[in-house]
Every structure is written in structure tokens, then in C-alpha cells.
Image (spheres, grey):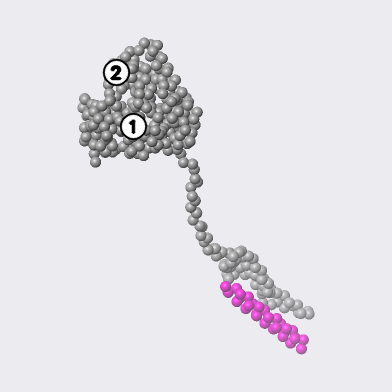
């Protein structure tokens, strides 16, 4: 009877382990089991020892879809340790908003006015009835064709006056004082000195007189720059044209003394410009540009097929007006060679020059 009880107990234990084993196999069907290790289970009943079907202890590497890596330990007769490798489902992409356009930071606009200190070369012809109906100074040309702001051609920012010498610079600056201090003028051009030098071009000077002229001109130019700076003009916005070693209409008869004086003046002007920080414009560029249009030994000009004669008359087919100043074609070429860069505008084309002179439609 005792043997039967033990036998029945043994059968019950075996049945239980079969159920457990099948359960574990079902759970493991979805994972890969690496080299399971089988350990015997020993059961003692009284003085009887029974060895049953082994329990499995397995280390399992499973791939699961999860949001984190985790370790799971399951204990049900057998122990299973799982170290699944996590494959995270990526979060949907976040749209990066486009940069919001920003308005440019408002800045105070720079003064647009151009002040001019000078003589008849810059004095508007229409303000003194010079030349014919289509005769214009360079200031009038750039005002009409490039919109340069002189406020008023006769009473605005052009202080230049026919016949003035460098001694008149102080008085001309007085006319520009208010617009400079009111922030109306952004740049000042100084283009003066021909009337100081005109006499010595034809009449020899004693050494003392020659040296006195040099010192006076240089002092007047230097004082003019200092006065403009004192009014608030930045030296970088001051432009001085140096002196010409010839006149445009006639050859000098006292050329050697005249040219020597001009060379000394221009060397001093460049030294002054470097010391004070203002700009020096080389007037020789204007003569070179005019010469580039010469088509014969008589120095007649050809521009876009139109011949401009090297003579004086109030018709714009003449290089000079009746009183000896450059006519419109000449003044336009001067504007191109000296001032368009200062004014930040494009040069006039040959076609525009002829239109300005009334020689084309």
C-alpha cells in the first residue's frame, strides 16, 4: 500500500513538471534560446529520493519593440533571464519653423547734398548766362543726368563763384555753414585755384612773389579744410582737386615757372591730405580723358561719330564756349574723369553726353 502511494505521488509530480515544461516551451516559442543548461530536481519523500525531469535555465536574447532597454527575470520552476535589444520607434519629425523675416534696423540716412567750393569751373552756367542754350557746367550735367543734390543750382550747395581765388574759400564756406550743420551736406568738393595761377602762367614772377603766391594758396586751402572739419565734416568726405599745370584754352608762355609752382603746390596738397585725412583728386585725369577723344593734331574730338571742334563758340559742337570755358561735351568728360566715383554714380555714356549737349535725340 505504501509503494502504491509513493508511486501515485511520483506520477503526480511528473505530471506537474510536464505541464510546467509545456508552458515554458510555449513562452519561449517567440524567442531564441541559447544553449539551455539542464539541472536535475531532487525530491525526497520519506526515505525515498526521486530525480525528476530537469528544469531549464536559459539565457535568452530577444528582440522586442520597446521604448527602453529592460531586463526581465521570470521564475516558474525554471529561471529565464532576458536582455532584449531595444529598437525605439523614432519620434515623428519636428517641423523647424522658418525664420521669421525681420525688418532691417532703421538707421539715420546719410546726407545726400554735395557742397562745392570753387570758381567758374563749377559755377552753374545757367546762373550767369554763360554759353548757349545747351551749354552746361559739370555740376549741371550731373544734377540733370545723375540726380546729384545741390539743393538749388544758383543759391544752394554750390558756393563756387566765377572769378574767385583761394582767398574766397572762407566766404564760400560761410554759405555752406547752415546746411552742413543741419546735416544736409554729406560731401564737399574743393575745386579752386586756377584764378590764382592764371597770371603766372603768362607773366614771370620774381622769386619772392612766386613764393608768396605758393604760401598764400596753400594757407587758404589748408584753412578751408580746417574750417570744414570744424563745422563737422569728416575729412574722409572732403575732396580737393589738385592744381592743373596748364590752362585748358591757351598754352602758358611762362610754362617753366608755372609748372614748377604747380608741382610744388600739388606735392604740398598731397602731404596735407595725408596728414588731415581728406581725399586728393588728380586733375591730370581730366586732361588725359579729354585727350583720349582727340582725332587729329588740331585736337578736335570725336564722340559717337560727332565731331567737336577745338575752338570757341556758344554752339555745343565747339569744345569751348565763347568766353573760353569748356562747353558741355568737355564738362561732361571732366565729370566722368574726376567726380563720378566721388558721387557714387555711373559715368555718362557718350550717347548721354551728346544728349546733354543737345547733339542727339
| Number of marks drawn | 2
Q: Split into 4 quadrants, where in the image is the N terminus?
A: bottom right
Magenta stretch containing residue 75, yes or no? no
Q: Residue at x 27, y 38 (%)?
A: 355
Which residue occupies the foreground of this view, 71 or 135?
135
Say if residue 286 shows up in the picture.
Answer: yes
Chain-order first, disc 1 or disc 2: 1
Mark 1: few, some, or many residues within 10 Å (few <14, many ≥20)?
few
Judge whether 252 appears above or below 283 on screen. Answer: above
Judge whether 33 appears above or below 272 on screen. Answer: below
The answer to whether the residues at label 1 and label 2 have Cβ atoms under 8 Å apart is: no
Q: Residue 101: where, in percent of width, then height? A: 48, 52
Q: Quadrant of residue 48?
A: bottom right
Which secondary structure lies at badge 1? Answer: helix
Mark 2: few, some, or many residues within 10 Å (few <14, many ≥20)?
many
The residues tagged by marks 1 and 2 sit, at their Cα atoms, a distance apart of 29 Å
Residue most extreme to the bottom: 1
Say if residue 270 shows up in the picture.
Answer: no
Which of the two discs, 1 and 2, sits closer to the camera?
1
**Residue ID for mark 1:** 127
Q: Quadrant of residue 217?
A: top left
Which residue occupies the foreground of this view, 310 or 303?
310
Per the picture, the main secondary structure of the magenta-coloured stretch is: helix
Which secondary structure lies at badge 2? Answer: loop
Q: Residue at x 45, y 23 (%)?
A: 222
Q: Which residues are magenta?
A: 1-30
Q: Residue 143: where, in percent of width, then height? A: 35, 37
**Residue ID for mark 2:** 252
Amino acid at each position: 500500500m505504501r509503494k502504491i502511494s509513493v508511486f501515485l505521488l511520483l506520477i503526480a509530480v511528473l505530471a506537474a513538471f510536464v505541464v510546467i515544461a509545456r508552458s515554458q516551451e510555449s513562452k519561449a516559442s517567440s524567442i531564441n534560446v541559447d544553449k539551455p543548461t539542464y539541472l536535475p530536481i531532487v525530491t525526497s519523500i520519506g526515505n525515498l529520493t526521486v530525480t525528476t525531469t530537469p528544469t531549464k535555465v536559459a539565457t535568452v536574447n530577444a528582440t522586442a519593440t520597446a521604448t527602453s532597454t529592460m531586463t526581465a527575470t521570470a521564475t516558474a520552476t525554471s529561471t529565464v533571464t532576458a536582455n532584449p535589444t531595444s529598437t525605439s520607434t523614432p519620434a515623428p519629425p519636428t517641423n523647424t519653423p522658418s525664420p521669421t523675416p525681420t525688418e532691417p534696423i532703421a538707421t539715420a540716412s546719410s546726407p545726400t547734398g554735395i557742397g562745392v567750393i570753387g570758381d567758374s569751373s563749377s559755377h552753374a552756367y545757367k546762373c550767369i548766362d554763360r554759353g548757349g542754350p545747351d551749354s552746361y557746367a559739370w555740376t549741371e550735367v550731373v544734377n540733370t543726368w545723375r540726380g546729384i543734390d545741390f539743393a538749388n543750382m544758383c543759391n544752394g550747395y554750390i558756393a563756387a563763384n566765377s572769378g574767385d581765388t583761394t582767398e574766397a574759400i572762407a566766404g564760400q564756406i560761410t554759405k555752406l555753414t547752415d546746411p552742413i550743420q543741419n546735416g544736409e551736406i554729406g560731401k564737399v568738393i574743393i575745386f579752386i585755384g586756377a584764378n590764382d595761377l592764371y597770371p603766372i602762367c603768362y607773366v614771370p614772377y620774381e622769386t619772392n612773389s612766386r613764393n608768396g603766391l605758393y604760401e598764400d594758396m596753400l594757407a587758404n586751402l589748408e584753412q578751408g579744410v580746417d574750417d570744414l572739419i570744424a563745422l563737422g565734416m569728416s575729412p574722409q568726405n572732403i575732396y580737393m582737386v589738385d592744381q592743373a599745370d596748364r590752362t585748358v584754352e591757351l598754352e602758358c608762355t611762362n610754362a617753366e615757372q608755372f609748372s614748377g609752382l604747380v608741382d610744388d603746390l600739388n606735392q604740398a596738397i598731397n602731404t596735407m591730405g595725408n596728414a588731415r585725412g581728406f581725399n586728393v583728386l588728380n586733375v591730370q585725369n581730366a586732361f588725359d580723358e579729354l585727350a583720349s577723344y582727340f582725332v587729329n593734331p588740331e585736337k578736335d574730338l570725336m564722340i559717337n561719330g560727332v565731331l567737336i571742334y577745338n575752338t570757341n563758340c556758344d554752339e555745343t559742337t565747339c569744345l569751348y564756349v565763347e568766353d573760353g570755358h569748356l562747353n558741355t561735351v568737355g564738362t561732361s568728360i571732366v565729370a566722368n574723369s574726376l567726380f563720378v566715383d566721388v558721387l557714387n554714380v555711373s559715368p555718362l555714356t557718350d550717347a548721354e553726353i551728346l544728349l546733354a549737349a543737345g547733339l542727339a535725340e
